[in-house]
Image (tube, rainbow, N blue to C red):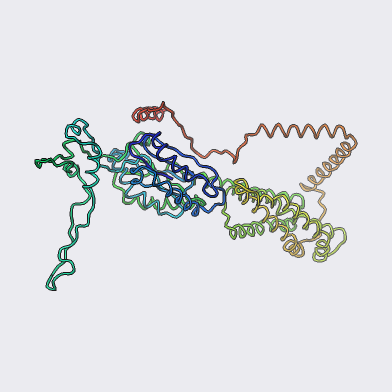
Amino acid sequence: VTTSYPGAGASVVAESVTAPMEEKINGVENMLYMSSKSASDGSCNITITFEVGTDVDMATVLVQNRVNEATPVLPEEVKRQGVKVEKQSTNITLMINMLSPDGTFDDLYISNYTTTRIKDVLARINGVSKVEVFGAKDFGMRVWINPDRLRARGLTTIDLTNALREQNVQVAAGQIGGQPAPKDQPFEYSITTLGRLQTVEQFENIIVKRGEQGQLVRVRDVARVELGAQSYKWFAKLDGAPSIAVAVYPAPGANALNVAEGIKFELDRLRKDFPEGLEARILYDTSEYILQSLKEVVTTLIIAILLVVFTVYIFLQDFRTTLVPAITIPVSLLGTFAVMLTLGLSINGLTMFGLILVIGIVVDDAIVVVENTMRIIDTEGLGAKEATAKSMVEITGPVVATTLVLLAVFVPTIVMPGITGRLYRPFAITISVATLFSSLNALTLSPALCGMLLRPSRERKKGFFGLFNRILDSGTTHYGSIVKLLLRRSVMTAIIVGGLLVATYFGMIAMPAGFVPSEDEGYFMVAAQLPDATSLGRTEELLDEVSAI
């Protein structure tokens, strides 16, 4: 919720504008909390945060109704400015800097070009909630009042303001020859009069007061008029040159990558019409970090698949046998993607991370089917189809049981309440669906592949596999001996386990904690805090020093 009270200080805005609206908005349906900011430039900004899953369109309507209740008690100047209620995310998708590197255009021209030619185009892009121009200096006619002259003529600032407001209007002057008119009336003319004033001279000639003798007091007699900016409360620079920063906010639930792509497409189209000497640069772009992180996750996913296939081949030591679990991986992943699309989930860091974790799960059941079938072929001498049929009778129950156990771990996460549940729901759905497809493949696809591909295995005593088998057998024997020793030495075992638990605890508390992992997003921000009431010029000098570092 945003509005402004021109000329008012922060305390006045807080008492006369912010407080009445907060009082009415407080307690709106599904509201979690509310924060507000009343600034010395007269601006008021109230942010209402709602529960996860709330219909943001309905929330906007409810807040607008509460604001309407507070409107009658707001100052008249605020009513004229209007109160805007908008839905938007608090995060900026990207920031566009408009500048003139060679100094061809000043910040006033750049600001107006941005407002009139760029802002509205970007605001129409699907998924964009708000386009805010920082450092905007829209054209405005500035009237500098001379208090002494005003007082000498018996006038007040209210008289001057009323004159400006009454004489700077667009009026409907009517028609000449309009109906009803004589039948021989040949033409009809619409009367066009001077409406909104545009030049300094026109504003200077506005009549403020008429004396008894017919003498006139005009604006130029009591004030100085100049064409400038409506507000000078912001400034922006890029590499030392005056700049206008355009921040694009996404709508709640919008796809950041689609929004960024749409903005870049429109900006490329708009660049063709830029006057020579005007540039648009995108230096802050959250989509670059998202794309890079997804590329890293895809790379990790491919590596995980290769490692799983390699591990299976090392232990099964037969290419035909390795094909069975290897084929189940893409089948399970494709099935998972299909379900994600049906449920409206997107490919993001969490869902891809879930797929990485699930790679090892989707082949487990297939490996069980293959190993048990190979055991029957080797020990009982049955053919591939007969061995597969017997194997499935033995392991169908265990496959279903292990699937249910895994689902019992991940499914509850889907129904977790609050923002935590909302955040990890795609992660849980991805793993649960992939696990279901793994079980389905183990009961259908894997047996069919086993019946076609499996052959009796050959005992390998030489070469790499022979060496690997000897090392594995030796390791298994020693591992069994250690387990037997630990079972006989229960006190020592308890001490070792306790030590591991303590080490785990201290390792856990030593790790940095956070709602989501902190990662390098390719930028950092620096804030400079100056004393209260510091002028904008002094602030600019300090930031110039910081920028030069």
The picture places residue 103, in percent across and down from the top left corner, at 29, 38
Report whether 459 appears left or right of 156: right
| Residue 484 visible | yes
| Residue 260 visible | no
Report whether 186 appears left or right of 63: left
Q: Residue furthest left?
A: 213
Q: Give the number of callouts.
A: 0
Report whether 155 appears left or right of 545: left
Q: Residue furthest bottom?
A: 183
Give whichever of 180, 271 is nearer the camera. 180
Give whichever of 318, 77 is nearer the camera. 77
In the image, is residue 427 above or below residue 383?
above
Q: Residue furthest right?
A: 488
The picture places residue 186, in percent across and down from the top left corner, at 13, 70
Which corner quadrant of the image does residue 363 belong to? bottom right
Where is the C terminus found, in terms of image quarters?
top left
Q: Residue furthest top?
A: 531
Which corner quadrant of the image does residue 16 belong to? top left
The picture places residue 305, in percent across and down from the top left corner, at 66, 51
The picture places residue 129, in percent across and down from the top left corner, at 44, 50
> Looking at the image, which residue is at 18% across and 39% down?
219
Where is the N terminus found, in terms of image quarters?
top left
In the image, is residue 355 above or below residue 13?
below
